[in-house]
Amino acid sequence: MSDNTLKPRSAVNQEYTWDMSLMYQDDAAFAAALKKMEEAVVAFNQKFAGKVTNVENLEDAITEFEVLYEEFYKLSHYAELPMTVDRFNPTVVENATLFQNTATIWAANMSFFDVALTELSAEVTEEFVATKRPDLAYYFEKINKQKAHMLDPKVEQALASLNNLPNFYQLYEVTKHEDMTFDSFEVDGKTYENSYVLYENLHEMDNNTKVRRGAAESFYKTLNAYKNTTANEYISTIKREKLLATMRGYDSVIDYLLDQQDGDRELYDRQIKTLMTDLAPHIRRYIKLLGKVHNIPDMQFADCKINLDPDFEVDMTIDESRDYLKKAFAGLGQDYLDLVDESYDKRWTDFPQNIGKSTGGFCATVKDVAAYILLSWTGKMNEVFVLAHELGHAYHFMNAGRHQSILNFDCALYFVESPSTCNEVIVSNYLLKTNTDPRFKRWVISNMISRTYFHNMVTHYLEAVYQDRIYKMVDNNEMLNADVLSKVKREVMEEFFGDSLTINEGAELTWMRQPHYYMGLYSYTYSAGLTIGTAIANKIEKDPEHAQRWLDTLAKGGSMSAKDLCKFAGCDVSTAEPLNEAIAYVGELVDQLYTLTDELEAK
C-alpha cells in the first residue's frame, strides 16, 4: 500500500490542530453560551420589536445588536469549524446540531430587526449617522439599496427561518466527504490509495504521468457515480436562488447575487469577458512549455498542475514555514509579523491531513479572537504560498475587527481575495530577490503561475465562466441535468485551453469539485482579488512605503464599497487598467520561464 494512507483525526499531532478553546473553554462553556444567547435574543425582540422608529431607540438597538451578533458569530464558528476537520466525531455533530437549534431561535426573534432598519425614514438614518455613528454610513447606504427588494415582513421572517434549515451545500459536503470512496490504483507494481485530499493535494501534482493519470481515472470514476446526486444538489441551489431573485423583483439571478455581495455588474462582466480572450493565450503558452519540459506530447487537463521542473522540489516543515513567511512579510511591518507569530503560537492553523477533513483551504476569522485557517500540509514549499494566502485573510479581518464594528466586519466580495492573493505575490517577489540560482528562480515563477495565477485566475475563473453560463440558462428556463452541466463545463474548458491540452475523459466533471458554487458568485472574485493583489504587491515592491497605505485599507473592513476600497489602496478598478496589467504580468512571467528554460537547457 501507499505511504499516503490518511490517519483518523485522533491520531494526528494536536500541536498542529486548531485550539478551539480560544473561543470557549470547553463544550460545557459553549452549551452555556448557547442557552444565554437564546434568552438574550428573546429579550431583544421583546424590547425592540415595533419600537425602532427614532434615533434614540435605533442607537440602543444597534448597540445591543452588535454585542449579540458578535457572540452569535463566535458561537457559529465554534459549532461549525470542527465539522470541517472531524465530521465523523459524534460530539462535533452534536455541537453543530445544538447551534442549529439556537440559530432557529435567533432567526425567529431577530429577523424583525433587518426589516425595521429598512423601514426607517431617511431623516432618521441620516441624523443617526451624522450625530451618533458616522462609521455606519455605508452600512445604511447598503440597507437603503435593499428597500426596493424587500418583501412583506412576515415573508422576510419566514425566509430567515428557512435559511437555518439544512441546505444543499451541507448535502453536497455529505456526498463528497461521507458517501464517496475512491478505488486505489496501481502503477508499476505499486498500489496508491486515492481520496479527495490525496488527489487534490498530491496525486494531481505528482511528477509521474502514469500516477497522475491513474489517479485521475480513479478520481473521476467515483465522481461519475455520484454526478446525478451532486447535480440535483447544485441545481436545487441555483433554482432556489432564481426563485428568490424573482420574488425580490430581479430579472436576472446574476444581478440578485451581485447585490447580495455588494457587487458591481460592470466589474463582473469585464472580468468574465476579458480573461477568456486576453489571459488564455499566456496560459496556453505555459502549458505547452510544461509539455515540452516533461516530454508529454499529449498534454491533458490531468497534467496541468505539475511543477515545471520534474526533478526540483523544495521540502518545507511547518516550523520552517514561519521563518520563511516572516522574512517575506518583513516589509509589511511589525504588526503583520506579530500576527504571523500569533497564528503559530496560538494554533490558529489546522495543518494535518486526516479522515473526515475537508479539502482545500480557508480562513474563518472570529473578531478579536482568532483567524482559523484550514490547510492540508504536504511538507512541500508550495504549501507556504497557500498559508501566505490564508494569512492575508487573517490579517485583513483581524485588522478590520480591531477598527470596525461587527456590522462593518465583512467587505464586498469583489475585494475579499485581494489581501490573500497579494501575499502570494509578495512571497514570490521575496524568493526571487533572495536567490539568484536560475533553476530556483524558474521553480518560483513556475509555482507562481501553477499555484497563484492558475488557481485564482484560471481554475476559479473557469468556475466563474461556467457559473455565468449556467445562471443565464436558469434565467432562460432551460433544462439542466448532470449531462448538461458537464457539457457546459467541457465547452468552457476547451474554449480557454484551446489546442494546448486535451480535456481527458471525466475532467468535465470538475464542476462537482467546487464548493464555491453553493456560495453565490464567489468564484469570479478570486481573479478580481488577484488583479488587485498583483497591482498592490508590485506597488509595494517598487515603493515599500506603499505598504502602510495597504494596511490602512485593510482596516476599513466593509465601511466602503469595493471600488472605493481599491481606490483608497491605490488601485482604480473603475478602469480596465489593473486587469490588463495583471494579465500582462502573467505574460511576462511566462516569457521569463521560456528564457530560463532555454538557459538551463543550454548548460
Image (cartoon, rainbow, N blue to C red):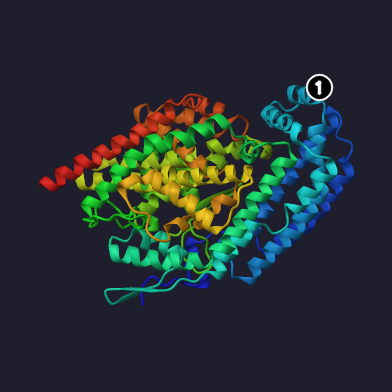
* Closer to us: 169 or 75: 169
Instruction: Tell me: 417 left or right of 98.
Output: left
Q: From where the camera sits, is residue 440 visible?
A: yes
Q: Residue 572, image x and y in percent? A: 48, 25
Q: Is residue 373 left or right of residue 288?
A: right
**Quick one: 74 or 337, which is closer to the camera?**
74
Q: Nearer the viewer, residue 127 or 1?
A: 1
User: In the rendered view, would you say 91 is above or below 535?
Assistant: below
Determine which residue is flagged by label 1.
Answer: 123
288 versus 86 height, above or below: above
- For the image, the number of numbered tags is 1
Q: Quadrant of residue 219?
A: bottom left
* Horizontal and vertical percent position of residue 64: 78, 41
Position in image of residue 55 (x %, y %)? 83, 28
Q: Residue furthest left?
A: 603
In the rendered structure, the answer to whether residue 273 lies left or right of residue 205 reads right
- Is any atom of residue 437 visible in this view? no
Q: In the image, what residue type sits under mark 1?
A: Glu
At x 50% / y 57%, what residue is drawn? 513
In the image, 189: left or right of 471? left
The structure residue drawn at horizontal position 27% and vertical position 56%, both measured from the top left corner, is 298
Q: State the residue at coordinates (77%, 41%).
A: 65
Image coordinates for residue 491, horizontal then vertical, percent: 44, 48
Question: Element type at marker 1?
Answer: helix
Image quarter (top left, top right, bottom left or bottom right) of the N terminus: bottom left
Q: Nearer the viewer, residue 450 or 188?
A: 188
